[in-house]
Image: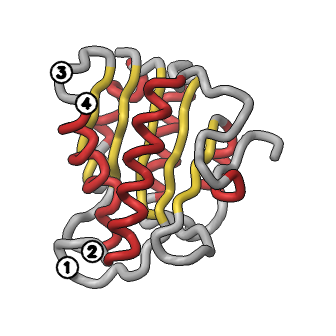
């Protein structure tokens, strides 16, 4: 499978469901594209490991503690994802994401082209809808994911409109 977009989160906890909401939007936008699979990864399951291992390119979308304003979006690439997930309390699902990537690495099947699109939550209270700030961030994340699947391999220049929000290897 060339590209896998995996949205992660718990849609019962308002902004924590940002990745799932993004994946649902992307599934509509990318319907009919045999080269891209979009999945609602929910709160993760080890059953997703074979799908990650089969992907040539992986885009993960999740709510993440970025230390920025609610709705801010940051995109990380390659090994920066593992360094980011290695820090304490950066994502509600950080252990799950880190474990999923480690399973793929141990199987020698970690996609070389991989990105994590993180969206800063405003609230993780009970609720089925994201906050307005995060809804705007989801829209930005969707556009970034669409650009990624069209522009792999990632060029040297950042893909986001505001380079300060797009973190790249070595910079």
Label located before the other in sequence (2 or 3)? 2
Label located before the other in sequence (1 or 4)? 4
Q: What distance separates the C-alpha of mark 1 from that of mark 2?
A: 5 Å
Q: What distance separates the C-alpha of mark 1 from that of mark 3?
A: 31 Å
Look at mark 1 in the image and give the residue it sits on: 127
Look at mark 3 in the image and give the residue it sits on: 32
63 lies above or below 60:
below
171 relative to 92 in the view: left or right: right
Residues at discs 4 and 3 in contact (Cβ within 8 Å): yes
- Of tags 1 and 3, the one toward the viewer is 3
51 relative to 122 in the view: left or right: left
Residue 31 sits in quarter:
top left
Residue 52 sits in quarter:
top left
- Of tags 2 and 4, the one toward the viewer is 4
107 relative to 21 in the view: left or right: right
Q: Quadrant of the N terminus?
A: top left
Q: What distance separates the C-alpha of mark 1 from that of mark 4?
A: 27 Å
Most extreme residue toward the front is 161
User: SS at mark 1?
Assistant: loop
Residues at discs 2 and 4 in contact (Cβ within 8 Å): no
Look at mark 2 in the image and give the residue it sits on: 14
Assess disc 4: are there few (<14), some (14-19) or many (≥20) residues with their C-alpha within 10 Å of its C-alpha: some
Label located before the other in sequence (1 or 3)? 3
Q: What distance separates the C-alpha of mark 2 from that of mark 3?
A: 29 Å
Residue drawn 25% across the image and 15% down it = 34
Q: Nearer the viewer, residue 169 or 10?
A: 169
User: SS at mark 3?
Assistant: loop
37 lies above or below 56:
below
User: SS at mark 4?
Assistant: loop
Residues at discs 1 and 2 in contact (Cβ within 8 Å): yes
- Where residue 11 appears, as percent x and y from the top left, is 22, 65
Q: What distance separates the C-alpha of mark 4 from that of mark 3?
A: 6 Å
């Amino acid at each position: 499978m060339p590209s896998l977009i995996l949205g992660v989160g718990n849609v019962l906890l308002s902004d924590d469901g940002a990745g799932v909401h993004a994946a649902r939007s992307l599934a509509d936008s990318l319907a009919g594209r045999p080269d891209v699979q979009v999945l609602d990864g929910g709160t993760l399951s080890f059953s997703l490991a074979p799908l990650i291992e089969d992907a040539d390119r992986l885009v993960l979308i999740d709510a993440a503690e970025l230390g920025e304003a609610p709705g801010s979006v940051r995109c990380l690439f390659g090994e920066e994802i593992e360094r980011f997930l290695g820090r304490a309390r950066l994502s509600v699902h950080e252990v799950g994401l880190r474990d999923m990537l480690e399973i793929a690495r141990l199987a020698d099947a970690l996609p070389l082209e991989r990105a994590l699109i993180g969206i800063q939550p405003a609230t993780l209270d009970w609720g089925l809808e994201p906050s307005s700030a995060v809804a705007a961030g989801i829209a930005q994340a969707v556009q970034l994911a669409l650009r990624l699947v069209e522009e792999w391999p990632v060029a040297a220049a950042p893909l986001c409109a505001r380079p300060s929000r797009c973190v790249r290897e070595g910079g």
